[in-house]
Image: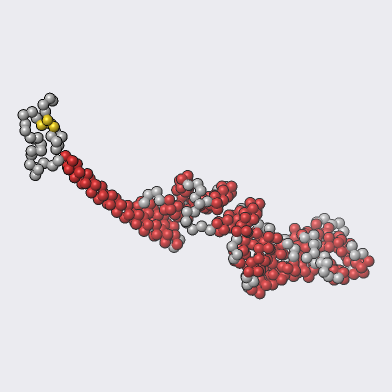
Amino acid sequence: MRGDRICPKCGQTIPRGTAECPICARPISFYLRRETLLLVCFAVLAILFTITGFAVKLYHGREQSLARSWYNRGENSLQKRDAAGAIEDFRNALFHEPGEPLYQLRLAQALTNSDHFLEARSYLLRLWAGDPANGPVNLALARLTISQGGPPSQVITYFQSAIDGVWNGQTEDRFAIREELCEYLIDHGERTEAAVELAALAPETPNNAKLITQVGTLFSQAQDYALALKEFQQSLHLNAHQPDAWAGAGQAAFALGQYRAATHELSRAVAERSQDPDAVRVLGLARDILEINPFDRHIPVQDRRRRAFRAFQTAMVRLNQCAQSKGETLGVQDPQSKLQTVYADALKMKPQVQSKAFQRNPDLLDSEMGLVFRIEEVTKDECGAPSGLDEALVLISSKNGAPD
């Protein structure tokens, strides 16, 4: 309004007819200026926010501490193979710190160990959806799928994702994971897939004799005996005092028909560890083959002849024993059974297996051994698997008489 004045101190209008500003004229002990009041309010609010933040932080710290304590108890329960206790502990950890991925993962693993597969899968799939490249989660899903009897294709996918995945500082052993995958593939007859994984596993194997022996064993189980033998030999080059490696090398060499090498390596295996029934059995069989194999080119013609004659006699004994166990009569005029038929053929061959006949016709060896192999196959079908020299003859037959 015209004539009104403005107070230079507070900026308020001084009413007409008033000499002083009514606000500034009030005693300072009773009134505060507006700016001062606002500053005080802000200061009080700041103090309250600080106190609240500290209280919240203290609360969350306490919750995290309780969660970590329950998590550690869960880990101890797992070490004691107390899966039920571990489940309860990890649930308590999640109560104090909901959504923590590590606690969810360990709870899912404990649930898997207790055969609570559906609940375990629920946790794991939730974790996987949030982080599909998570290595531990993919590994846990692979093992859970195996426990549930899931399809091999899904198991393989999870294992491969675990191998190639991110581990974020958690304990990882990609070699062990790939080894576990190979064992799974071999156990489920997926030998082609196993060969692919083993081809990737072998170059990654640390320069450790024990680990290389494990890889050699996997190659043997996958029936890739040539690569198995190579791995065992590499392992033995690092450490020659390994019964498992000697036995593995011997059995791989045996499967490849390298009977002299097998005898040497299996002998070392038995020397290192005499209580190895498999090594002892295969060693005895390798020695039998070397003793009776007439196709061995390392021996003179006369020795080959003697071996062939011994093989014929061995087969005839087996034939007679088999017929006796079945109550069949051999040497009948009109053969009806397989045993009678092969016996009749043997009687025709018998006059020709003399040493002089062999000297006149060295090719007789093939005919004679062909009959021996027939006798062994027929008796195996009729009377079960043979042993000793008869088993050796069956194996020689399976190798087509190939020399060592």
Residue at far top of view: 2
Q: Which residue is more in the foreground, 376 or 70?
A: 70
The answer to which quarter of the image holds residue 279 is: bottom right
The location of residue 225, given as percent across then percent down, is 69, 60
User: Total marks drawn?
Assistant: 0
Q: Residue at x 18, y 41 (%)?
A: 35
Q: In this rendering, does residue 187 appear at all? A: no
Q: Residue at x 60, y 61 (%)?
A: 205
Which quadrant does the C terminus fall into?
Answer: bottom right
The location of residue 384, given as percent across then percent down, is 72, 61
Task: Please indicate whether residue 395 sits to the left or right of residue 56 in the image.
Answer: right
Q: Residue at x 5, y 29 (%)?
A: 17
Q: Which residue is more in the foreground, 119 or 337?
A: 119
Task: Please indicate whether residue 86 sits to the left or right of residue 35 in the image.
Answer: right
The location of residue 354, given as percent across then percent down, is 90, 68
The answer to which quarter of the image holds residue 183 is: bottom right
The location of residue 226, given as percent across then percent down, is 70, 60
Q: Which residue is more in the foreground, 252 or 133?
A: 133
Q: In this rendering, does residue 105 appear at all? A: yes
